[in-house]
Amino acid sequence: MNIIGKDIPRKDAELKVTGRAKYIDDLTFPNMLYVKVLRSRFPHAMIKDIDISRTKNNKGIVTILTYKDIPGVNVVPVVLMDQPLLAEKEVRYIGEPIALIAGEDKEATEDASHEIKVEYEELKPIFDPVLAMKRNSPKIYGKDNVFSHHRIRRGNIKRGFNECDIIIEHRYTTSYQEHAYIETQGMIAVPYEETMVIYGSMQCPFYVQDAVSKILGLPYNRVEVIQTATGGAFGGKEDVPSLVASQAALIAFKTRRPAKLIYSREEDIESMSKRHPAVIHYKSGVTRDGHLNAVEVKYILNAGAYSTLSPIVLWRGTVHAVGPYKCPNVKVDSYATATNTVPCGAFRGFGTPQITFAVESQMDELANKLNMDPIEFRLKNILRKGDRTVTGHLIKDSMELEKTLKKAAQIGWKIKKEESKDYIKRGIGVACNYYGVGLGAGGKHLSKAGAMVSVLGDGSVNFAVGTTEMGQGMETVLSQVAASELGIKYEKVSIVLTDTTRVPDSGPTVASRATVMSGNALIKACKPIKKSITDIAAKMLGCAPSKVKLANGFAGFEKKRINLDDVVSECFKEKRIMSAQGWYKAPYTSWNKATGQGKPYFIYSTGTNIAKVEVNLLTGEVLVKKIVAVHDVGRVINPQTAAGQVEGGVLQGVGYALFEEMDSRDGKIQNTNFSTYILPTSKDSPQIVSVFVEDPYPEGPFGAKGLGEQPLIGVAPAITNAIFNATGIRVRDLPATPEKIILELDSRQGKF
Amino acid sequence: MKVYNPKNIKEALTYLGGKDTHILAGGTDLIVRIKDRDIYPKSIVNIKMLHLDYIKINGDFIKVGALTSVETLYRSEIINTYAPVLSDAVGKMGSPQIRNLGTIGGNIANASPAADTVPPLFVLNAGITLKSRRGKRAVAIGEFFTGPGENIIERDEFITEVVFKKMESDEVWFFKKLGQRKALTIAKISLAFGGRLSGRKLNEVSIALGAVASTVIYAKRTADFLNSKRLTRDVIDVVSKIIQKEIEPITDIRSTVEYRRKMAGALLKQGLLDIMYSVIARQS
Ligand SMILES: Cc1cc2nc3c(=O)[nH]c(=O)nc-3n(C[C@H](O)[C@H](O)[C@H](O)COP(=O)(O)OP(=O)(O)OC[C@H]3O[C@@H](n4cnc5c(N)ncnc54)[C@H](O)[C@@H]3O)c2cc1C
């Protein structure tokens, strides 16, 4: 147990820092082709003709393929199966794939992509997610452009509001957010005898396997997917790598040659998923003594042209629509609507950051109207063990929101208001959040995970899991789990590349689930091996197996210690089982679609963020001076990687709050690279104070829950609440750019 | 595409003159344009080997070679002492990588209305030295730009040097840049200010603004208004209105007309308030 909770160095650190890690673009195969995707220039149009006659004979061009060349079915499998790999007759967004070009070098394919003439007949597009639901709007999905609708009904909403003393109602909007992973999307497909082998940057190898097998019409056992070092993902490599892999695979399948496809940054931003822009109508009411009594929400997500993961993103947002608070009367209606824009999808927080911005802005404003300290107001309403969430879920385990709130307040809830310059105003703001760990009832059939562990003859260990490392630190944390479980030294344990042939389908690496799911599977896989080791060690030590202690490379009994390598070697001589599979199935969850009641997730992580800001009244600029982030994640396995998650999440949250704005004009994204899509730099980073409160979750490996997404979720509202505290300006449209703040200041005819 | 690597100015000049011939200094603007398929050069003249990387004092003047990098300018004691307004501006440019590669000549020749060295050079009233096979000429920076990305350089010429007068100790100055974030950002608007202060009275005021018109511009009327005025809160309030009428900003991906207009006033106000506060602090 002694390496759990320690700052163990990351397994992948040295490889990545020294540049020896192999990312997909570092690989080449003999006779490899380069692929380029031809994309739609119109948001909504019929394809009349694709003229490849001239281009296909270009020097260096090997083949040009359209949907007609797909041997399997032309569909990218996610939830609703509405998205084709290559457009057939109609294109529905700018950047939609139409054809694939393969050539001997990159330049030839690039030039060809500029030469192919596509004849279009333009159709009327729809861009606005709210107007999309109107009767007379152009239809791109079903009768009403609604991909998905969810609801929560609890108590009596009318009576609830009647009982309230203060009711506020506002509209909130949030912008796209781009994942901005350093490594763009990329795949190589390699035909090997009867098998299509896919290498690439991804979160979910089993999604890729499913997609490629559908497109090529191959059984799963003829598609092998191997994840290469993945340079960031944040949800942006959940479902869309299925497209990239299938595009490369189709070329490889047709030409019988390896095919490499690496997206340019511009292509990646234009055509890959992002965080959904949202429109939120939020009405909430409190009684005079500060109890939240009624909440009514309409939550609309702009899903883009195809549904992809939107139904589940929307579902998660719906579940979290009231925040981590008790409320007896709730009515939530949420919609994901189709527009002629790039399909949105998974992004760290998965539908929760948008709604949390509205929730926490409302809570702040209610506290203000009640003349109550925002912390005190929250303490009256937060969920504790024994409470029911707004979906009726009785919380029994690990719920330490109160501790995070009190801890954060203790560290950060004071401020020197005055600055020496009278045009600088200081403010402070707080936001709480909770987050259902794992897929929950929204992805039940996927809520499982496998692991394979093999202790080798020299005492070193290989293990494989079905979830992936994408920079978040899973490899390190799981190595700690395996090492601790077997008592073998951490240095002797290593993960093998995630490969669909080594482990059973373990679902996706999303929803902050890898530590809990793969961790538990790994512990189970270690069990029979641990038994072998303990039995043999007991013999060697001359004691009962139950008396043997395994830790840090040794087996011990009372004062005697023997080297585990010797025990392992003995195990091999005795032909004991030293390699095993583990399987873990998530605890029960449930959901009633009509009422939105049930147990949507088996456990929640929680957190509190406090932001300190300075607002320049002359320029409207906001400087985030400090973020205090306190999270309850069950048990911390590695404090350093956990703090890393928090720091990255905070900075991504600062970007979401202040800078990151995607300008989509007539369906065309204007900021297609990082000179115009503005991410925070180290100079924009606040001081980040990251603290954990621990309340072990009995089901989790060593008591751990999930952490990956949490750190981002509450940051934006903490900042906008601090802006309010500093200036009295309430920002309801993210991001809070100086342009918006100056406009507000002006309308108030302030002193400056 | 042909690339020439001349060893001296004379040789370099022999390659210039063609329509699709481009000069390569640090390449931080040029290479981006080539990749964007914005230009298709037939030949490139790399001027890196021309020994134009220097900062010299010549009597009352400072001479800066066109190939001097932004980072060298930033680290220069001479620039820091005698042209602090420029020193401040280069400190706010790009990232370490960009500052190491980007040159002052490239920043000027590229003629972006948002170029950060240009407003300070306006305030310093710099002269730009151009050479061609025909000879050498000097042009005042205020006369150098004709539009966004456009300047008076002829095809057979290039910039060799930038010359300006040393600033003196009674001169006050500031450079303000508003970007979309704290670092690695292109100006939404920038403002350079220079003038002399005796007591609280201003004189010889010069103000230049970036990213509020098709080129960097002088705010002449605003400067005239301030000349021989005492710095008071009222004067500052009035002048920050005047400057807003002297500019023609646009809305683009970085900001809006309204914001840019307001900020011309706000930046001037902030700078002048800070000067006023420090004078008051010194006097009391
Ligand atoms: C990521 C990034 C960040 C940036 N940040 C900033 C910033 O904060 N502020 C800012 O002002 N700029 C910024 N820039 C723009 C650029 O770095 C600067 O303009 C830089 O000074 C250009 O110098 P260079 O030597 O790289 O020019 P080059 O790219 O080599 O040349 C630019 C243009 O000038 C011409 N040219 C170059 N030298 C001469 C010469 N001596 N005579 C005649 N013509 C010449 C070239 O032919 C070309 O047309 C940024 C650019 C990037 C890519």
Image (tube, coloured by chain):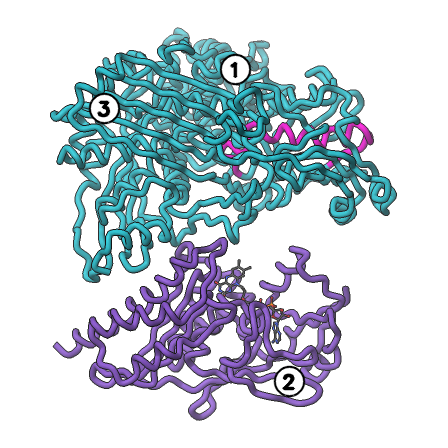
Chain colours: A cyan, B purple
Vertical relation: B69 (above or below) A290? below
Q: Residue at x 32, y 69 (%)?
A: B268
Residue B131, numbered circle: 2
Q: How many marks?
A: 3
Residue nearer the viewer, A18 or A276? A276
What residue type is disc 2 on?
Lys
Residue reaching furthest to the bottom? B59
Quick check: can you spot residue B274? no
Q: Residue at x 24, y 86 (%)?
A: B198
| Residue A261 highlighted magenta (yes or no) | no
Chain part drawn in magenta: A232-259
Judged from the image, the secondary structure of the residue bearing numbered disc 3 is loop
Residue at mark 3 = A382
Residue at mark 1 = A446
Residue A582 location (% of width, % of height): 52, 13
Task: Determine which quarter of the picture holds residue A746.
Answer: bottom left
